[in-house]
Amino acid sequence: MELVEGTLSVDHFLTVTLGIVVLFIGKRLNQVIPAFREFSIPEPVTGGLLVCILFYALHVFGGISVQFTLGARDVLLVYFFTTIGINASFRDLLAGGKPLVILLCATMVFMIIQNLTGIGVATAVGLEPAVGLLGGSVSLIGGHGTSIAWAPIFAERYGITGAMELGIACATFGLVLASLMGGPIAKFLIQKHQLSPESNEPVDVGIMDADKPVGLHYMDVLDAILSIHICIIIGVFFDEGLEQLGVQLPLFVSCLFAGILITNLRPDALPRITGTKWPARTPAVALIADVSLGTFLAMSLMSMKLWELVELAGPLVLILGAQVAVAATFIIFVVFRIMGKNYEAAVVSAGFGGFSLGATPTAMANMSAVTKSYGACHQAFIIVPLVGAFFIDIANVIIIELMLGWFA
């Protein structure tokens, strides 16, 4: 750590270490505050928000800003999505074909509604309509990356001062709201319709809250780590090959596909140096998935610079408030119904709440928290990331371009 002119810089090692501490804080908070568990609030969210507020207080009252080095966070995300690929089966993928198409179509409709909501609220309060679009799918479904990419265009074409800051603020607050919304919606749907999983299988991430602690042999964990690394190496080659063809995908999506292909195409009789079977849907893989996702999200939330966002909160409160109300209504009355009105639909609804306002990792954290409370739902962990991390990015670009043409 180094303190220079009021900025405390934290290196990779300490950032990851603090992320683990924050994850423990979240787990302890969820243990002692029953409401957090009952509403399936992800553990890294409770811990991350608390520590983020403490850093905000340090900045306001102590004049010290904390700057984290977050390179290792992206590695954790790759680890997590690779475990999801390893756990996937072609049977689930084939069964998920129709639900995936339905969810994608619903998401595209929602993106248009989300943009119209933002434009309508912005116009009503005297802001440029383009500000509403920036507070729509650009920053919410699009996230920080899309906001940063489109902000210069909004600034140049429409003269929006501070477009970058506005987009980042919306994306950040949206991430928090998405983390808090998915679990309660799923709880409401599950209890109202008395839903339960069709089978009693191990969950994809971690273990269920009601289960006894799982005993793991060190060979199980070592085998899982080796398998994940093999998939990541192949995923990197896959990603580089796609780049040569002009196709840009996030690395974690390439590693997700690599995990799916290796799990389903490798012969069961193929000998392995570990002497064990491929570790799909094992407690060791579930443990690594839980730690990777939890630490990633904890690091993301604890590193938010609230002092840079609070000044922008005023004009965005109405836009974001309206977006939350519209998203919740759409999930309950549209997504849940068209996805089948069953337990899987409730878990998908929690995931939709995550990426509709936040990001795909938030969606996965929401679904993980729900399944830990109520039971496994393998298919949801396949179709939600495919829609949230791949297809909607393409659709979002088209929708943004079309709607920007309205202001020309």
Image: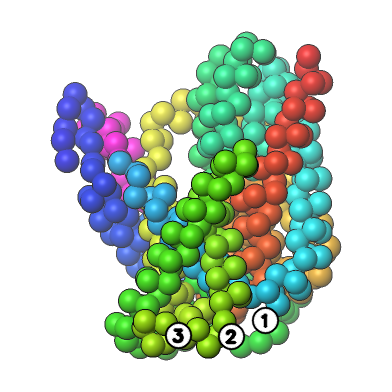
How crowded pointer 2 is (Cα within 10 Å; few <14, some 14-19, many 20+) is rated as: few
Q: Identify which amino acid the numbered label 3 is placed on.
A: Pro
Q: Is residue 63 magenta?
A: yes
Identify the residue under disc 1: 197
Tell me the distance, in whole angstroms, between the alpha carbons under discs 2 and 3.
27 Å
In front here: 13 or 367?
A: 13
The answer to whether the residue labelled 2 contacts the one labelled 3, judged by CB atoms less than 8 Å apart, is: no
Question: Height in image: 164 above or below 284?
Answer: above
Specify start and end residues of the magenta stretch as a single range. 49-68
Q: Residue 201 carries which label?
A: 2
Position of the N terminus by quadrant: top left
Question: Height in image: 401 above or below 343?
Answer: above
In front here: 129 or 399?
A: 399
x and y, in percent, of residue 101 in the image: 80, 58
x and y, in percent, of residue 247 in the image: 62, 42
Tell me the distance, in whole angstroms, between the alpha carbons under discs 1 and 2.
9 Å
x and y, in percent, of residue 66 in the image: 27, 37
x and y, in percent, of residue 292 in the image: 41, 62
Identify the residue under disc 3: 271
In the displayed structure image, the side of residue 222 where residue 49 appears, left or right: right
Position of the C terminus by quadrant: top right
How crowded pointer 1 is (Cα within 10 Å; few <14, some 14-19, many 20+) is rated as: some
The answer to whether the residue labelled 1 contacts the one labelled 3, judged by CB atoms less than 8 Å apart, is: no
* Residue 204 figure quarter: bottom right
In the displayed structure image, the side of residue 362 where residue 336 appears, left or right: right
Element carrying mark 1: loop
The answer to whether the residue labelled 1 contacts the one labelled 2, judged by CB atoms less than 8 Å apart, is: yes
| Callout in the foreground (1, 2) | 2
In the rendered image, is residue 84 in sight?
no
Count of marks placed on residues = 3
Q: Identify which amino acid the numbered label 1 is placed on.
A: Pro
Q: Identify which amino acid the numbered label 2 is placed on.
A: Glu
